[in-house]
Image (cartoon, rainbow, N blue to C red):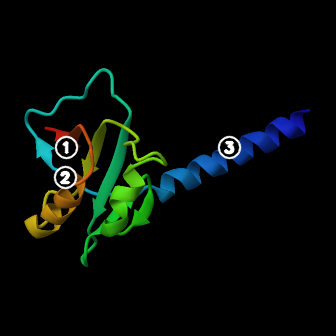
Amino acid sequence: MIDMVFLLLVFFMTVSTMARDARPDTELPVSGTATVPVEVPLRDIVTLVGDGGPYRIFRDNRETRLAELPGLLHGAQGAVHSEELFLRGPPDLPWKNLSKVLEVLRQTSLEGLVFATVEE
């Protein structure tokens, strides 16, 4: 019995480490008015990552292309998975890249868009 508990413990420690490492990391802009909400509604998360080259787009930790993004945000019946989208991206993101993403998101039926920032 103790062997089984030990194996499960090792398994979950390994899986949690792998899941954390798979998350795309990006620097967020600092905001003097940002506050952490008490209750966070269900949101899709889109992350823009730039590491010296062209910016890459991730949805729920999976890299995707800009053209595929509207289809990923909609369910099988065409309904949006969540009402709001949480958009994460670096503060030095060029406007031409951000405007392309915003134009694609405008074509979906999202109710709201939240830009991720860090409290000052």
Distance from Cα at disc 1 to Cα at disc 3: 31 Å
Per the image, the residue denoted by label 2 is: 106
Q: Position of residue 74 (x, y in %)?
A: 40, 49
Q: What residue type is labelled 3?
A: Phe
**Around disc 1, counting alpha carbons within 10 Å, would you say few (fewer than 14), some (14 to 19), or many (20 or more)?**
many
Q: Is mark 3 on a helix, strand or loop?
A: helix
> Which of 93/111 is in front?
111
Point 82% across, 35% down: residue: 5
Identify which amino acid the numbered label 2 is placed on.
Arg
Determine the residue positioned at 14% across, 34% down: 34
Image point 23% across, 37% down: which residue? 111
Q: Amino acid under label 1?
A: Thr
Instruction: Name the residue beneath numbered marker 1.
Output: 117
Q: Is residue 17 left or right of residue 108?
A: right
Q: In this view, does 2 lie to the left or right of 71?
A: right
Discs 1/3, front: 1
Residue at the disc numbered 3: 12
Decide which of tag 2 and tag 1 comes sooner along the chain: 2
Question: Eyeballing the image, is 34 above or below 47?
Answer: above
Residue 102 screen position, x and y as percent:
17, 57
